[in-house]
Amino acid sequence: MPTSTGERPDLPEYMTWEELEQLPDEIAGEIELWEGRVVWMRRAPAEHQDYSVELRNGLRRCAREEMANKPDRRWRASTETNVFFGTTGKSDFVTPDFLVYPCLKQEYQDIRASDVLIAGEVLSPSNTERDVEAKKARYAGAGIPWYWEVILGRNPRRISSIRAYGLETGHGRLPNGVAPLRPVNYIIAGEWTPAGSDGISFDSPFPLHIPWSELEF
């Protein structure tokens, strides 16, 4: 999930999807619309793209193995694909670094948040906690059942850890008179590091077994 504070063209604070489509691709591709508000997301470095693709490939392989055993369950894994919130309209969307969703009925069909099983972000040391939590809250509020984080390290470049968060639709006990800030939140349900495991091993939303060797380049 890269962010940018560099020089940007002078755009209004709010835009519609139709207005966004009129912008050059190199500008529109750096923007998400959060309930119509323009949120800038810069192009990521090569390492970010590489790890996003390698994880997508691992998820895709696992999805295909599941489909071979259960043909009625059909999944797709993609990278940097817009996910639209709500049942209609396109002026409220985010672009996860990778995602898993059921095969849709029509070709080139828009992906809605209600379709998504896993939304994931690749995080570099430059990502701030505020940015990460804001986007995570969007995924949770949309009811996406799984959120994954891939945390990158430096010197050498590598995956430091991968975390899987499950959506908690209720909440734990709080002191009397205190209410949670958000009605739904994510709870960490799995974490893997190269030093502590042979790779990802998880059984939801379908069996996922991805060795670290598949996530190296």
Image: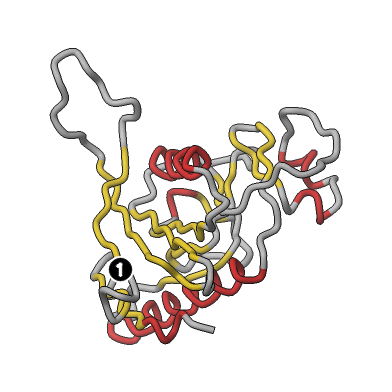
Quadrant position of the N terminus in the picture: bottom right
How many marks are shown on the rendered structure?
Answer: 1
Q: Nearer the viewer, residue 124 or 63?
A: 124
Q: Name the quadrant containing residue 35.
A: top right
Above-or-below relation of 173 to 92: above
Pointer 1: what residue? 192
Q: Position of residue 59 (x, y in %)?
A: 42, 75
Above-or-below relation of 1 to 139: below
Q: Nearer the viewer, residue 70 or 148?
A: 148
**Residue reaching furthest to the top:** 177
Q: Position of residue 168 (x, y in %)?
A: 25, 43
Quadrant position of the C terminus in the picture: bottom right
Q: Nearer the viewer, residue 148 or 207?
A: 148
Above-or-below relation of 1 to 158: above
As shown in the figure, which amino acid type bears the numbered disc 1? Trp
The reply, left or right, for residue 216 in relation to residue 165 is: right
Q: Position of residue 122 (x, y in %)?
A: 51, 60
Above-or-below relation of 56 to 170: below
Q: Residues within 10 Å of mark 1 (few under 14, many from 20)?
A: some
The reply, left or right, for residue 80 in relation to residue 129 is: right
